[in-house]
Amino acid sequence: MDDTKDAITYLEKLFEKDADGHGTDHALRVLGNAMRIAEREKCDLQVVKLAALLHDADDHKLFQTKNNENARKYLAEHGVDEEKTERIIEAINSVSFSKNGSNKPKTVEGRIVQDADRLDAMGAVGVARTFAYGGSRGRSLQESIAHFHEKLLLLYGLMNTETGRLLARERHEFLLTFLKEWERETTAVTPGKPCFIPAIDQDAAILALKKREKDLVKYQWIMEKFAAGDCGAEFRRKYCGFYRVRRDQAWQREYFGLMDRYAKRKGVAFGEILLRLWQKTGRLECSFASKMLATLDDSMPIWDGRVLSALSLKLTGKTPEEKLSNAVLLYERIVSWYGEFQKTEQAFEMVRRFDETFPGLSEISSVKKIDFFLWAGKG
Ligand SMILES: [Fe+2]
């Protein structure tokens, strides 16, 4: 019996009118993902295969069937015995995000198919499907973007299997890149909307910075050591002193462990650092995540409460997951503010005066120099 060919013919009939990302092509991609994951798991391949193919055959968004009628009909017609049918149905029923949220399926087959289905909601395919589905429900583009935050960005943290997680990682990063670009294109200087200019008395700020020259030197020391890969105990101690890290040893171990790992990788996103820190420490560390990123890449800014409040932005969200994805957006706003502000007269002047006052620290990035001004200008 050729399960795949028969099932596809069956699904094509079922999904005849579907054009919103739940069709036969989706079932086939889920099957492909499931087979890749299954290679590394001890499981019943036939259950995985049929559950992957039929997992949306009774999707409540498309069908009003009861008790998985459509899937059962196919299985009965293809001589699948009762015991196996029940295992396939159980796997199918444990897949749905809306029904199960973050509950893990009880069987390995369910876990595989759930990962496979979730993979298809991420990456380029995930982006395309989100807008196709949104369009079919009359949703605006912005409403579809909201779905990224409510669901898609959470999926990576919810993967069940090792292979699933591995495959999900690139797709998750693609989602973040997509959102970043979306944000950049939709918030880029609106004509007539001037960039926020912080009210900073530059003379006073320079005076304050001179008094804190030791801190500036400490910052440069931290960046030099980091660049040299010399991130031992002294580095950690000074880093914690400079950034006022008041967290216990266990937290610091996780934090610096992550930093060491990211030091070997290029292009780590704020969202990933935030997600990892949250998974490892149970805390949403917007500020410390940005400090880690700014150490990895000194053109990236620090999560700054002052910039946020000046832009009337506030971190909202009921659950940590919601806050996490909102934080990614807010950080993007901070990044784009820095991008805009750097082009202004005031910013040029800040950088010029910084270099004039501290010629030995001119290597520091412009973003950090501006950050120092904001810091010194604080009350
Ligand atoms: Fe699906």
Image (spheres, grey):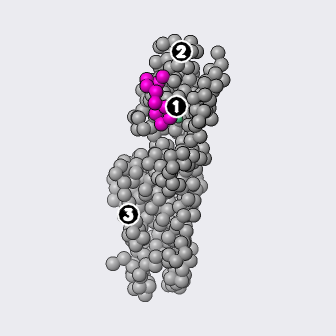
Q: Which residue is mark 2?
A: 76
Separation (CA) of disc 2 from disc 3: 55 Å
Identify the mark nearer the N-term, 2 or 3. Answer: 2
**Three-letter residue code for mark 3:** Lys
| Dominant SS type (magenta) | loop
Q: Going 47% across and 59% down the picture, which residue do you hit?
A: 329
Q: Residue at x 40, y 51 (%)?
A: 322
Q: Quick one: 351 or 295, which is closer to the camera?
A: 351
Q: Is residue 340 magenta?
A: no
Say which label, 1 or 3, has the lower sequence index: 1
Quadrant of the rendered structure where residue 233 is? bottom left
Asked whether residue 309 is in view, the answer is yes
Q: Is mark 1 within 8 Å of ligand 1?
A: yes
Residue 63 in the magenta stretch? The answer is yes
Tell me the residue that label 1 is attached to: 56
Q: Secondary structure at mark 3?
A: loop
Which secondary structure, mark 2?
Answer: helix
Task: Tell how many labels.
Answer: 3
Q: Earlier in the sequence, mark 2 or mark 1?
A: 1
Residue bearing the label numbered 3? 314
